Amino acid sequence: MALYAALPAPALLPATSVIPPVSFRDFRAALRAGALPPTTLALVHADGPRLAVLLTAPTGRTLTADHPWVRGQLRRVERTLNVPGLLDSALDTVTLTPAHYARGGHPGGAIYGAALPVWRGGPLHPQPYCLTPTLWQVGTGVHPGGGLPAILGGALIVDRLLREAGW
């Protein structure tokens, strides 16, 4: 799941922080069982006053920002990065739940992992890149990989397709 926040001032954080679970063994076992892990893998992206906190959660879960597990994981992120109350001052937040990603075609809401079969990636992706004559898809749902490489790779593919189409 992903939580995006608009802060009143730039976060005093590195651009990207990776916070591993305390025990990868417990983390993997919980995810395989569809349970919430005691501690999870968290990715934090800070860009000026924009903040993204991504929490790895089991697929098919209904999680919101006020869920006790999510609040606990966010407190752990704040403690680990030494930024207590980081989200308390947020001007606005948006939470993208596993259900949001499931509506986009990711099985159970998984962006990565066992729930996303290999045939869903790259050139075997079942959706067309060109949805309408003026709407083209780019990003992690249409190109293998993750994050910026996926978005840029998808954009390069679409750029080539647009040029070939005479745009």
Image (cartoon, rainbow, N blue to C red):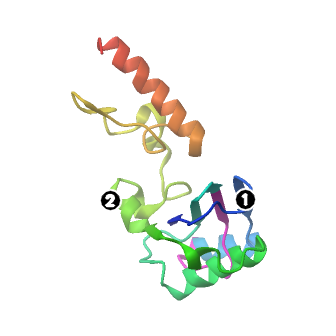
Nearer to us of marks 1 and 2 is: 1
Q: Position of residue 134 (x, y in %)?
A: 24, 29
Do tag 1 and tag 2 residues touch (Cβ < 8 Å)? Answer: no
| Quadrant (top left, top right, bottom left, bottom right) of the C terminus | top left
Q: Report the residue at 38% width, 67% height from top.
A: 99
**Residue 131: in sight, yes or no?**
yes
Q: Position of residue 33 (x, y in %)?
A: 56, 76
Q: Which residue is mark 1?
A: 17
Q: CA distance from mark 1 to mark 2?
A: 28 Å
Count the marks: how many?
2
Q: Is residue 89 magenta?
A: no
Mark 2 neighbour density, 10 Å: few (under 14) some (14–19) many (20 or more):
few
Q: Is residue 41 magenta?
A: yes
Which stretch appears magenta?
A: 32-45
Q: Report the residue at 50% width, 55% height from top.
A: 111
Mark 2 residue element? helix
Apparent side of residue 79 relative to residue 99 in the rendered image (left or right):
right
Q: Which residue is mark 2?
A: 103
Mark 1 residue element? strand
Apparent side of residue 102 relative to residue 68 in the rendered image (left or right):
left
Compare marks 1 and 2 and give the one earlier in the sequence.
Answer: 1
Which amino acid type corresponds to the residue marked 2 in the rendered image?
Arg
Which amino acid type corresponds to the residue marked 1 in the rendered image?
Ser
Q: Position of residue 7 (x, y in %)?
A: 56, 66
**Residue 96: in sight, yes or no?**
no
Apparent side of residue 59 relative to residue 30 in the rendered image (left or right):
left
Q: Which residue is at the front of the view, 119 or 27?
A: 27
Q: Position of residue 125 (x, y in %)?
A: 40, 38
Tell me the quarter of the picture where residue 149 sits.
top right
